[in-house]
Amino acid sequence: MIAFLTACKRGSVVLCLFLLSSGVPSLRARPAGAALAVIPQPAKVELRPGAFRFSPKTRIYLETGNRRARWVAEDLSKLLSGLMGRAVPVISAKPSAPERQAIVFSLKAPAALGPDGYRMAVSRGAIRISAPKAAGLFYALQTLRQMLPPAPGAPVKAPLRVQCVRIQDRPRFRWRGLMLDCSRTFLSMEYLRHSVDLMALYKLNVLHLHLTDDQGWRLAIRQYPKLTTVGAHYAERFGGAGGFYTQQQMRELIAYAKKRNITVVPEIEMPGHSGEVLAAYPELACPLPGENRTFEVTPFWQRPAHFSEPLCVCNDQVFEMYRNILSSVINLFPSEFIHVGGDEVPKQAWNESSLCQARMKAEGLKNADELQSHFMKRIEKVIAAKGRRMIGWDEILEGGLAPGAAVESWRGAKGGLAAAQLGHDVVMAPNPYTYFDFTYHSTPIEKVYSYDPAEGFTPAMAKHILGVEGCMWTHIAVTDKAIDYQIYPRLLALAEVGWSPERDRNWPGFDARMLRQFSRLRSLGVTYHDPRATGAEVGAWSESDLSGDAPRVFNWDATSLIGNAPEAQVQVRLESGNGPVYVRSFELLKDGKEAGEAVFAGPLNKRNDVEVSWLSPGARHPGCRYTLRVTLQGSMKGSSAGSVWIMKPPHSPAEAARP
Ligand code: ACM
């Protein structure tokens, strides 16, 4: 779907040099693909002979009274206790010499390691972890976690050990983010916690929540109840589905993330992508002569126009309301940055409205771009007055931007380059590399991995790169599994882009380490894309089967393809690209009776587009006949051919056994 997705996002879809100070020993970078299958690859690794073997005598020593350090030590204790089937105590003291079976956490380390840096020395007798700040200890724990086998829910039978090694590590960038669009699809608190856990494991530290958009307002704001009573749910005629987070739930998520070193950055989108706000408060649209305007919250594929009507920025009620909303948001979220969207604003209504024409004249604004910029600068002042910083998508640069504001570059890198040149800080999220809603065909894992956020920046401009962010818009993938599938393992590639030194990155080394993470992802309940997966074709349709836009039902025999696995991944693939094909329904029938259905959302637009979903056939009954019943709909634009596949579980037992 690349043309479609690049045309409109969702719509249609500090530099840190590694400091070698006198107190920090120089270590040789390890060769690619060596035994330490850790992602992101630590900055410096020196493998040593031998291993630290965990035993009943293993103890965790905490040489600091720091509360966050204690949390890290206790988390390690929990992990080891689960793996070993026995308690591994945490002792608040230095280990008595000689150190035997000691895992030692200390906050005595050179400040030059930075706030997230750490050192870890694994020898046969001890594991010593030190960092200047507790965040570094937390990251060391994630490294150690990945050197251990995945926790399978029961003690592991093999003796537990980790390779002797010396690691010195710190991130390349301070902003290593994931944007989750919880507006297009309302994401459960459970899914958000699952995402935080995975981000922490791969050392990401910013969870950007796209909390508001045309498909739903997701955060309760006491002063404006209709934002959630009306704006958080599809209109009745579309089934009313939706949801929102209470302020208490969000507080809990912020605390959960903070423990894992993750800052939650809220995005309150304005002044476009706000159809749900107009559904609740239609008076915030620009009045147009002779029109009594009403709006409703519609599912993405049912929306009446490609982009929704914007808020009427010429109406001071809009500014007042957003000032109050931001005040509530700033009270709730402790993050330095507050995201205000600002992208893809259709400005016709402003050009047609006499209110806006008068406003532009009064303020001396030449055009609608300057009108948006005028509004965003007022909003920036509200945020800055509370000691925070505004960030917005790269359109906020158009028409001028307040000096302290930061820019998230999504339409390629050019917005980031332009912003950095003007002295603004930037987060790089260029859609060809970092948009995980794009198909794996258009954005393979290797492409994500190949991205260098500093490419094209002069050293002076590069100082403005805060970091990098993966974006998961949820208008096409609408179930937890389908969303996971789009994100993983591309997020692992991006984690390494954000953390590891550019000079050491290489695809074959990463690829080998990534494959070794798959058993860990499975143990964590992650649905991921396995590039090695194979499958079998269940059925195919030709261009002539789908001429016009009448739905057509296909019944394909799947008896020999339904295995005993509790669920089967199904893929619908477009093999020619003359026009879009919609999957209207997808059912599995057992002896003619319904045995499960898969959820697909959105059309397949271009050749090689793949839609993925899952069926749960239950226990396979020998002798039963299984049929896939698929309803497809073509388009008057042209007919496309395609096929439906059932994928085999990708992993081999050998891979599952390796840490
Ligand atoms: C975007 O994808 N419109 C930020």
Image (tube, rainbow, N blue to C red):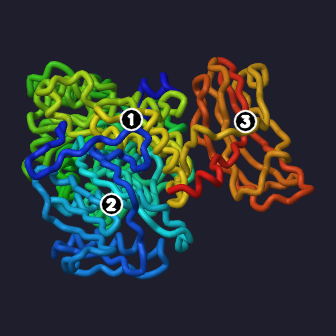
- Asked where in the image residue 102 lies, by quadrant, the reply is bottom left
Q: Helix, strand or loop at disc 2?
A: loop
| Label 2 Cα crowd, 10 Å radius (few <14 / some 14-19 / many 20+) | many
Q: Position of residue 249 (x, y in %)?
A: 35, 66
What amino acid is found at the position of numbered circle 2 in the picture?
Ala
Against 63, residue 47 (above or below) is above
Looking at the picture, tell me which residue is in the foreground, 167 or 331: 167
Q: Residue 434 carries which label?
A: 1
- What residue lies at 27% left-to-right and 45% top-to-bottom? 44
Q: Where is residue 67 in the image (x, y as percent from the top left)?
A: 20, 73
Q: Where is residue 420 in the image (x, y as percent from the top left)?
A: 16, 28
What amino acid is found at the position of numbered circle 1 in the picture?
Thr
- Asked where in the image residue 274 lies, by quadrant, the reply is top left
Q: Does residue 432 appear anywhere in the picture?
A: yes
Structural distance between the alpha carbons of marks 3 and 2? 42 Å
- Which residue is denoted by mark 2 in the rendering? 220
Against 95, residue 48 (above or below) is above
Q: Helix, strand or loop at disc 1?
A: helix
Structural distance between the alpha carbons of marks 1 and 2? 30 Å
What amino acid is found at the position of numbered circle 3 in the picture?
Val
